[in-house]
Image (cartoon, grey):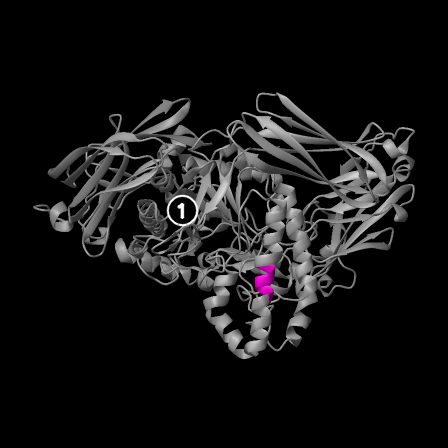
Amino acid sequence: MKKPALFLLLAAAPAALWAAPRETVTLDKGWQVRLAPGDAAAKAHPKAARWLPAKVPGYVQTDLIAAKVTPDPFTGLNEATIQWVGRSDWEYKGTLNASPTLLARGHVDLVFDGLDTFAEVFVNGTKLLAADNAHRRWRADAKPLLKAGANEIRIAFKSPLGVLKPMVARLENPLPGEYDSTAGDEPEGRQTSPYIRKPKYHYGWDWGPRIINVGPNGPVKVDAWDDVRIDTLRVQQEAVTPTEARLSADVTLVADRDATVQVDAIVTAPDGTKVRATRTVAVTAGENRVSVPLAIAKPQLWYPAGYGAQPLYTVATETRLDGEVVDTQQRSTGIRTVELVREKDAIGRGFLFRINGIPVFAKGANLIPFDSFGPRVTDAYMSRIMGDAQAANMNMIRIWGGGMYLPDSFFDTADRLGLMIWSDFMFGGAITPYDPDYRESVKIEAEEQVERVQAHPSIVLWSGNNEVLSGWEGWSDRTAFKKRVGADEQERVGVGMAILFDRVLRDAAERRDADVPYWPGSPSANYEGKPDQDGNGDRHYWDVWGGKKPATAYLDSCPRFMSEYGLQAMPDMATIAKFAKPADYAIDSPVMTAHQKFLKGAGQQRLLDYIRMRYREPRDFADFVYLSQVMQADGIQLGALHHRACRPVTSGSLYWQLNDVWPGASWSSIDYYGRWKALHFAARRFYAPLAVSAARKPTGTTDITLISDRTVPVTARWRMRTMDVDGKVTMAHEAAIQLPALSATKVVTMTDADLFKGADPKRSVTVVELIVDGAVASRALVTALPEKDMTLPDPGLTTRWSTVGGKPALTITAQRLARALWIGFGTLDVQASDNFLDLLPGESVTVTIAGKASAGALKKALRLQTLGAAK
């Protein structure tokens, strides 16, 4: 059998090897994987014990799915069938063909940008390195182990459970983790996840499966160099004014001898003009840091979406030895200033992002990993989801801390789209060990990750963790742990976390990305008081959904910054058809329950409870899917608009969550296959620069607030009408108004008696509109009763098909009020350009349809759903 080969193609080196340029080649071909010899799983899975094709970067699990050794865990009840993989040991192999030219280089490093997690690397049977952190880069000089011709590279992975379970079993009081195993492979309350630097969501979360991945999760490279190489390039902003931006290109050089080198830094502006600066320095063996100052006249500033343009600069460096270029690196960057403003006031301290001197209200969502199998996510898919976020008028995305550090291409997209990035370090909720070795590994991880991406202007906050600090303060299992271990151990754990999040990570962020603020965790008060409070810092509010309160509880307070809140919904029927069969289309079927991770499937009942709070009983499964999305969209819209109406007390609203790791019920507004739920269509309206908040409280009063994110005043009119479902107006008011820049202006508080005087509340709505330049910029509907208690008629919808811009177009006209209109096409893979609409009596809307489906198929599959009576 022909052996696989990883072909290393290196240019012939010049005669003076010490002046040869660095060569880096990615080794992504010819890899194979198998069960480690002697692994007990071979008896049940004999095919896995033979060498199978492997993708690198990748995971064993996806290779086994591709080889049909194990079925797709996303389908049906198959999640259970893949659990054995994470409990087993594995090995990869490939061949490196080393030429004499390669072997003549001073150093031939093998570089692994990710090994998940417990791994040993062997070259020709000799151990090169050992890894124990999936979030780090691993590098070692393989030259002493190489020979001319074929060289075997072997990576042996140990099961994370196999390594850690015996250790945890010996502990009297193991650290509290995240979610107990749903697969029966760890005892309840004895999780291994706190003790490993690995993506936490692999162990299962309340929106995704438990798949403990194993494999090389980052690229594998050969890095050949002589004498000196660039290890890192950072772009630091020293000072920015309208007339000049002072930057520095900070280069870390690794040298194997004393030498004199020249470091050139070249900045290329958006218009192509260049600025160059040079430093000549003496370096010694080891690490050397060189800073090259740069000055840019009249800099073009980078702004968040909605506040200005996103011009980007390129900073490149060249390192010369004896006049010859031996290494180069470059970064894309943008020039902007970032401040986290925490002014004290009567209720605490604020939490406001000021970009280039402009106070920005952050509008957006939380991002979880794009897939259960991160290496298979494409740049195109990430770009699509980010583009959808911007299309919904978002300007900030928070990278949640239980996942993985994202590639440079993600930040490139964020830079281009003007999406501010709040980036957690990868700590998802588990209490962290306090031993020095763990802390040192995290230190290296954090420094590497910050240095890798810090040049991106989209990054506006580094945050230490997700819910570790707030969980330690008040979660019941943490309280029980503290009681069990006693005061001394409790102090050791607490102090260890304080050192990690307030020193180690703060130091990594502030020293390596000095122009971006650091925040020790989310939610947090920056160690200035109890975390997760309205008056100080950011909040995660889960009394709605988790605490079973109605969505109107969002109106009870004005937090300084709401960084998490959410309501669940089912995905689109077209997505459900990807993992379930029609026989599974029942709210509590085994397949639907398996794809509902909240409380091990009990989230289906929670969805029903929330639907029943305000809406009718579902007529069938498809109606349940529809009503869940209406409930989610209406609830988050209420909260988001309330947060915006609380400005300037509140400065941000990030709902949970933007995306999914697999197809199932979750809090996402975009499902796993990229389909928009009703929430995402609603977000495009409630995050619009101009918006109306009409928040009706359970007390029967409605606050009407007009919101403007424009940086200049806006001349507008606002109109309020109460009408019945047939269009008869019983109350009308209209007035002119000047909206200040960056403002929320409360115009009136009305009682139900004022709004619905003389009208039947069962058949009436109040319509509040903001009108700019003669067009309705935003609209809000208010009802005195929940829709389940109203008499909403069949809206009398009529349809007409046409073509607009080469796409099928559908015009829908409502004879009577059409509340929460959903334009659906069953399981067809298509999407309307707009959806989840309220049509007033006599109104029409035209939407185009994107996707591959014939006109006949679209007409046949079309289903229009509303909260009104069915035909």
Residue found 89% across the figure and 28% down from its top: 14
Displayed quadrant of residue 353: top left
Mark 1 lies on residue: 652
**Residue 176 located left or right of residue 5:** left
**Picture coordinates of residue 490 (x, y %)?**
56, 73
Front one among 141 and 523: 523
Residue found 54% across the figure and 67% down from its top: 180
**Residue 723 located left or right of residue 493:** left
Front one among 493 and 476: 493
> Does the magenta-highlighted stretch encompass residue 309?
no
Question: Which region of the structure is painted magenta?
Answer: 496-501
Q: Looking at the figure, which quarter contains the C terminus?
A: top left
Displayed quadrant of residue 297: top right
**Residue 758 located left or right of residue 398:** left
Report the amino acid beneath label 1.
Gly
Front one among 145 and 557: 557
> Does the magenta-highlighted stretch encompass residue 497?
yes
**Picture coordinates of residue 207 (x, y %)?**
48, 55
Q: Looking at the figure, which quarter contains the N terminus?
A: top right
Q: Residues within 10 Å of mark 1 (few under 14, many from 20)?
A: many
Quick check: 303 above or below 666? above
Q: Is residue 419 visible?
A: yes
Quick check: 148 above or below 711? below
Q: Single out the residue that lies furthest toward the left.
A: 758
Q: Is residue 71 visible?
A: no
Quick check: 418 above or below 757? above
Displayed quadrant of residue 327: top right
